[in-house]
Image (spheres, rainbow, N blue to C red):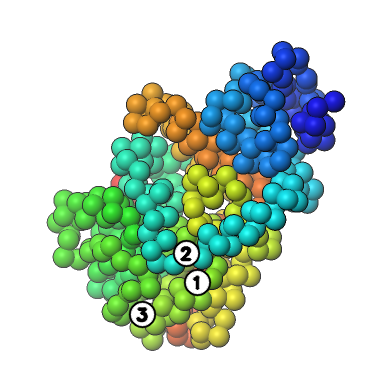
């Protein structure tokens, strides 16, 4: 029996996976499950199986990108769904762990890569966020929110869910008109523009992506608010000034554990005595770990999703009050599935922008990420921290009331 057959027989119990080997032989793993789409794979050569056994995520991703692993029935999302449904995080079996040697090499390399000094941070950000702007237009919502949406109803569309995310975060910030707000990792400017438009905030957004900066500045100018919503190409370590509120959505994943305390100290230092910050980040529900090799190599070099304990240690001793912590478990899975569907629908346009290999990489990325939240150990954390004990109301009612008011009065962008 081939080693890959032994690996897959141990892994796949629910659902049906068929593998066609290079010699034409066909092996079926698992049993039919009405909740899982059957998947058929063809291995172009013997190296495909060896790569998957050595490191399942890296091997599968690379073989699929290179066209050596072909999906003949089902698609990338069906494949990742079937596999991860057989290795759910809460079961604690870790069937997809790479070999000991691969883990050891990966751990050393990743600890070196994630140091994320300022020069590396800009290069890492450019790797992902300075892709052709037309790519993001093909699968994001109209407001270009490239972070977890907030589904008040799982059946909601992406536009509504992203608008509701903005309202959810804005309500937690308790912003009064005229307050100065710092948006760290401002993306294409959607959050900053929303806070100005709905709450009258004066916002400064910072990014390390030159492409995002161009779009954000153009949007502010087009809206006639460039004097109230400014965007700068600035590293968080170089922030100056004082702010009533600090918000950071989807940026902390790029800071690197060695710099968490630097990040938190900088946020505290730029906040007024009654300042409040809201940190929204992907996180891991278990203990600290490492980013899988495929994601670190192809999608987010230097990226790392923190454990809650790592975030807490970063602000301990800085005299910040943790005033609210929320865990979003499935919201990002639903977001990513909608992005995935849009990417698939725009396959021809994406392949025209790049090529078929890039399209396969991007679908594998979105599929793997979605299942990381649906079956794996990923979640989103929203942490609210304040400098003052009385900076915020002592119950959460104001959040609920503020969010409801924003959702009732503001239509999706």
Q: Residue at x 79, y 48 (%)?
A: 93
Q: Residues within 10 Å of mark 1 (few under 14, many from 20)?
A: some
Q: In front: mark 3 or mark 2? A: 2
Q: Residue at x 47, y 64 (%)?
A: 116
Q: Residues within 10 Å of mark 2 (few under 14, many from 20)?
A: many
The residues tagged by marks 1 and 2 sit, at their Cα atoms, a distance apart of: 8 Å
Q: In front: mark 1 or mark 3? A: 1
Q: Secondary structure at mark 1?
A: helix
Which mark, by number, is residue 270?
A: 3
Question: Disc 1 vs disc 2: Cβ atoms closer than 8 Å?
Answer: yes
Q: Is residue 202 above or below residue 76?
A: below
The residues tagged by marks 3 and 2 sit, at their Cα atoms, a distance apart of: 22 Å
**Is any part of residue 184 visible from this angle?**
yes
Question: Is 190 or 57 nearer to us in this picture?
Answer: 57
Q: Which residue is mark 1?
A: 259
Residue 3 horizontal/vertical position (percent) = 80, 32
């Amino acid at each position: 029996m081939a080693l890959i057959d032994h690996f897959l027989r141990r892994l796949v119990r629910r659902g049906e996976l068929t593998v066609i080997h290079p010699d034409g032989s066909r092996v079926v793993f698992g049993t039919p499950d009405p909740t899982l789409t059957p998947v058929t794979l063809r291995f172009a050569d013997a190296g495909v199986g060896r790569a998957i056994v050595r490191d399942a995520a890296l091997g599968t991703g690379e073989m699929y990108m290179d066209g050596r692993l072909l999906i003949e029935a089902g698609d990338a999302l069906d494949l990742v769904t079937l596999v991860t449904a057989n290795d759910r995080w809460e079961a604690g079996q870790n069937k997809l762990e790479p070999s000991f040697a691969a883990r050891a090499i990966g751990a050393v390399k990743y600890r070196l890569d994630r140091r994320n000094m300022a020069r590396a941070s800009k290069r890492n950000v450019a790797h992902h966020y300075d892709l052709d702007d037309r790519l993001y237009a093909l699968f994001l919502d109209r407001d270009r929110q490239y972070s977890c949406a907030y589904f008040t109803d799982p059946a909601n569309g992406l536009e509504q869910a992203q608008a509701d995310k903005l309202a959810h975060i804005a309500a937690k910030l308790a912003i009064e008109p005229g307050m100065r707000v710092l948006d760290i990792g401002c993306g294409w400017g959607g959050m900053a523009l929303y806070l100005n438009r709905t709450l009258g905030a004066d916002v400064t957004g910072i990014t390390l992506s030159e492409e995002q900066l161009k779009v954000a500045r153009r949007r502010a100018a087009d809206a006639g608010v460039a004097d109230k919503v400014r965007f700068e190409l600035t590293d968080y370590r170089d922030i100056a000034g004082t702010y009533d509120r600090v918000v950071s959505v989807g940026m902390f994943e790029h800071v690197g554990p060695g710099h968490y305390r630097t990040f938190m100290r900088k946020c505290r230092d730029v906040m007024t005595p009654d300042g409040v910050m809201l940190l929204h980040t992907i996180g891991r529900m278990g203990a600290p770990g490492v980013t899988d090799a495929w994601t670190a190599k192809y999608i987010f070099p230097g990226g790392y999703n923190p454990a809650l304990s790592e975030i807490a240690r970063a602000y301990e001793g800085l005299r910040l009050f943790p005033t609210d912590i929320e865990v979003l478990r499935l919201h990002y899975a639903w977001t990513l599935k909608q992005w995935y569907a849009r990417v698939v629908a725009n396959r021809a346009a994406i392949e025209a922008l790049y090529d078929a290999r890039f399209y396969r990489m991007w679908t594998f990325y979105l599929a793997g990420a979605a299942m990381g939240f649906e079956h794996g150990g990923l979640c989103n954390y929203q942490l609210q921290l304040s400098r003052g004990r009385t900076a915020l109301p002592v119950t959460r009612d104001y959040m609920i009331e503020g969010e409801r008011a924003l959702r009732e009065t503001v239509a999706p962008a």
